[in-house]
Amino acid sequence: MSGIFGIDFKNEDFIPLLDHWLARRGDRVVPLRRDIDPLAFPKLLPDCWIYRLQDNGEFHCTLAGDEIRQSWNQTLMGRPARHVIGENDYRYIGQRWRMVIERPALLYSTQRKMNIPKRSERLVLPVADDDGTIRQILGASRYDANRDDDELSPSFRSDDVRVWDAATLERVPDSEIPH
């Protein structure tokens, strides 16, 4: 399904989240977290998550929908991302999440292999605290249990990662995306 920015969403439920994020930012580069209304993307709520960048440089989970908790088969709330997704995968993902916050940027990816044996489609968006500081990422991940046997490896394998600068909404060159 074609969507905003030419993203061929595998699942159309991502489109209301992205539309809402864009609408709620108004004249700001990034919307405030408090301006995000979960009722604007109800079908995606079980697949949503929020991680906050702590003062120590670690991302900690502050929200995890039911499907996210079930997919990871562990408690996520309050846990550091590196403990959830593993050290190897966190090296890449942590860098990308920092890019989402620091640039700031929007990130879309599909993945075949990760620390869980499922295909995934993911959208990661920065959101700001009330003072305008960007320290949180709002994400949604859809996992597809249909997979080939060779996808049971826990190694990170990204099929497609695309990033857009939040200020200009222009695509970031692939060479600038951490891999």
Image: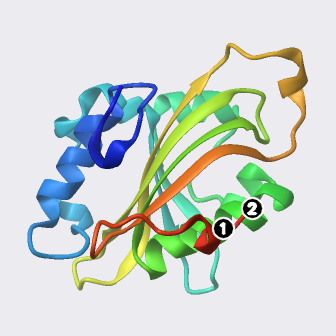
Q: Are marks 2 and 1 in contact (CB under 8 Å)?
A: yes
Q: Residue at x 34, y 67 (%)?
A: 170
Q: Residue 39 versus residue 118: which sits nearer the camera?
A: 118
Secondary structure, mark 2, is helix
Disc number for residue 94? 1
Disc number for residue 90? 2
State the image quarter where residue 35 is shown: bottom left
Q: Amino acid at mark 2?
A: Tyr
x, y (%) of residue 96? 60, 66
Q: Residue at x 33, y 84 (%)?
A: 133
State the image quarter where residue 175 is shown: bottom right
Q: Amino acid at mark 1?
A: Gly
x, y (%) of residue 147? 74, 17
Q: Residue 138 versus residue 120: which sits nearer the camera?
A: 120
Q: Is residue 92 left or right of residue 7?
A: right
Q: Residues within 10 Å of mark 1 (few under 14, many from 20)?
A: some
State the image quarter where residue 121 is shown: top right
